[in-house]
Amino acid sequence: MKKITKICLALIMVIMPTILLCACGSNGDNTSSGGGSNSGGQQTTGSLQELKDATVFTKNTSPKYDGSAKYIEFKIAKPNSKEYFIFTQSTDEFTVVYKNNINVGTASAVITATSKNPYYTGSATFNFTITQGSCTATSKADLLSYLNNNNYGEIEFTALGNTLELDTNDILNIEKTLILKHCEIVNNGTINIGLNGRLLIKSTDMNDCILRNNGTINNGGNIVIGGRGYIYNNNKINNNNRLFVESHGRLYTNSVINKVTKDPAFATYYTRTSILDSNIHVTLTDSSPIYYTGSEIQPDVMVKIGTSVLSNKNNREYTVEYFNNINLGKASVVITANENSTSIYGTTTLYFDILPKETTVNHINGLKTLLSDPNYTKIIAQGVYISEPITISNGVTVTFTGTTIINSTVTNNGTIINNNNLYLIKTIDNFSTVINNSNLYIVDRNSVTHNAINNNGTIYTNESLDNVGGTIKLRKQITLDDISADRTVFDYNGESQAPTYTFTGSDDALTFDTLYYYDEDIVDGKINYRYIPQTEAGKINVLIAFTIRSQAYYGEITTSYTINRSTLTPNDSTELINGIKNKNYSTIILKENTNYTLDCTSDPLTLLNNTTLKIGNNSNSTAVLHYKGEFSNNGTIINNGTLISDAVINDDNYSFGNIINNGDIVNNGTMIFNENSTLYNSISTGTKYLRTDINNYSLRQTNGEQNYTYSGDKRPIMQLMNNTTIIPNTNYRYYYNNWGIGNVSIEIISNINSTLIYGETTDYIFVKAGTCTVNSCDDLLNAVNDTNNQNENNYNTIIFGSDFEIAKNITIPSDITLDCRNYIPSTKAGYTLTLNGTIILETKLFGNAVLNKNYSGKVIAEVSTREKFNYFCGHVTPVDVIKLMADILDDTVKEITLDRETDRDLTVDLNGYSMKKITINNGNATSKYCHNITFTSTTSTGRIGVGSTTYGVVINRFLAPYTITFKNVDIYGTNGINYGGYEQLVKLDKTATIKNLANPD
């Protein structure tokens, strides 16, 4: 009994691992025994335990198929120990042999204890299950292969960017899970989903997953449409089990599908109707006629389901495409339901006609363009002038409105309709229809050839017409008896003149006030004849020729009228010159109190034969005619006023300004000639003068002076004269071309009516720099800035006439002398008077800020007392010249000390006056000294030492190498000069004399 129990337990332990693995999965540890009791079978010391009786733990006993060999983990306890043997394949202690461990199904592993195993002996067998795996297919071949492979229980099909298309003969049997993920499948065959089959259509990213069914789907299992999944059922789905639309899944079907369920929140399921269904009405929105435009025509389309208009915002429901929608004829529009349409599916076509539209043109070029385009069959030509051949094709209608002129050949194969005035100068070759509804003007029966005119209006023609109904009016050929003129003689007035003709030879007699030149000058309904009015004097032949536009006459006649020459009274010289050139004037009379000039130097002028030029209309006239250049007289000149012949000699010694007289000259007034005139001697009546050339004279001042001193804008009065004659100033005028110091140019022009001189010349005077007195700061600034055209100062001396404040920055140029003997203006703080020229002082100096020892100008001090002399000698401010203005002979100061620090030369100008003894101290304890010192007299001889009974000049101190020079000076004193040891530094010019006398004789 006990033995039987052990055998049963052993069988249970062999079977148990497989059962445990199936129940617990691959992640749990399973315990099994190869035999023996549940305690693991404690072995007796010194003996090995049978492996089949051992307790064995297994792991990963349900692996999924992936095409590789599968192994399970074994864990066997070591007896009497807490340690385990853990292995998957053979070790030193165990060998493991696997069978059927790759494909789906039951696999086995046989474990055998080796001779090296210290605990176990024998073998044990373990079974485990390999379950179906999953795979990814990217092609049709892969998909079909994997569906027929039992190793795979779940297939994911992905083909982003590609489309899998099942042909009509393809059958796809699904008995497992097929997941369609970001792909597109087009089914044209059959898809069968078995009871255990599952078709999941969804995407886990932003790419759509689409199944387009154009064939048959038989569903006996499950179809799930998930997020971003689409089924577009364009044929048939037989749903015998479950079809579920999850949230954000979409099912669009063109046929009814049974037992469809959906998520109530965001699932989309639409059953659509064929666009060809009788309940669907597709029409154009506007049923009005559609006319040709030259561009694509796209009428709007409207789709109704029953009585409701299907909204197609953003083309969501359907698209529209147009064909043959530009030219005349039948156009089509194809309406195609969109794949995502919620209401309709399929395609339908509408048709519409593009009809010809009446198009208006007003120029021959536009008419030709339309006639060359077959799409324009109804043309309105409004006021077109047809000047070149045109052809009207069959089926084309041209309607003329406004005023139309046909001045070329029109070939008509269509229809011409005239609704206004049509003037047919040339011909219409009519091979079809011409309809006149208004006024048609033609020449004769040859104007419209072949088919006759359908006349509903009035036709004006020169001869009768055959087979033409309606109103026909025949024109009359014009004769001289049919016309009369309001006048036939005109006086020339410079404008176009012609008679107004009245036509009386017909019941349709017409009078026209406006004359027209050519056929192109069209005024609707009023131009019936043409001729050219004339401007020039003489007899004028007039050709009156009636045009096609005439209603009463045709043909032409010649008549005449006369325009007589007239009298001109010109207002100025320009009108006079134009009048002499104009042959239409017989008499030209110059106006009183008017001067006329004929300048013919570049454009010779001729008074024509049979033309009279009158200078004034009566004797003693005040009219004046002055001519120069070449003037020929072939007519008659009657001078009742003044005639001035301004002849000049050119470089070729040819005289211009003489009248070349080939006609008659009658002098009842005054004639003035230049000295080279050839006509002077031929004039025997009236008064005449012979003038001389102005270049024989020169300008002089009336006071006889040749030069003039500048004094502002005041200019000298001049007179024209030579050695013996003064020309009265009524005979000439003069102008200063420039003004300022230096040579001044004066333009002298003889007056036109001078009887003494003629011509013009240029003379010169010399203007010297002047002196001005200033009494204000502005006066000073203006005087300093007064320059000639060479930028030279017109004043060389400026006198301060009063004491004023200088409140501007002013610079005195070096060529201007400031006379400060009366006043020295003060300078306002912040402003500077810069001095560069000569300064004349008398009472005081400018401050050191302006005049220092480096001053570049010249300072002259004029003195009349010994005190002033001593002041300017001893002052540290530089004085270059001390000029005596009186004798200095007082004895209040016996010495004059030259005590200065200037680093400059000093000149003492005695100016013809006398001084008493002078003592020279040049240099002192503080090293103040002059450079060179000169005593001179710029006028008569000066005198030093007058009244001295000892020395006239005493030199106490002087600094070499500078010198003391005496020029034009007499040195008095009984002993002359006391050189003080500096004799070698004293220079006596030959004009200087030592008198050795106390006083002059």
Image (spheres, rainbow, N blue to C red):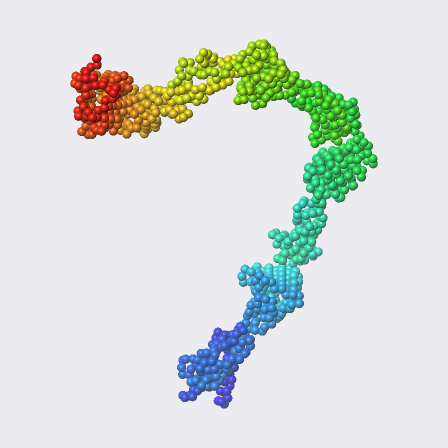
Tell me: residue 395, above or below residue 103.
above
293 shown above or below 711: below
- Image x and y of residue 511, in percent: 74, 24
Q: Where is residue 52 in the image (x, y as percent from the top left)?
A: 48, 84
In the rendered image of this protein, does residue 601 appear above or below residue 406?
above
Residue under the point 58% across and 73% down: 150
Residue sitting nearer the eye, 39 or 791: 791
Lateral position of residue 751 relative to residue 825, left or right:
right
Residue sitting at x 68%, y 39%: 365
Residue 267 seen in render:
yes
The image shows residue 450 at horizontal and vertical percentages of 80, 39
Q: Which residue lies furthest to the right in this view?
A: 467
Q: Is residue 183 left or right of residue 402?
A: left
Classify residue 744 as left or right of residue 657.
left
Residue 37 visible within the image:
no
The one of 451 and 42 positioned closer to us in this rendering: 451
Q: Quadrant of the C terminus?
A: top left
- Residue 88 place in picture, x, y as percent: 47, 78
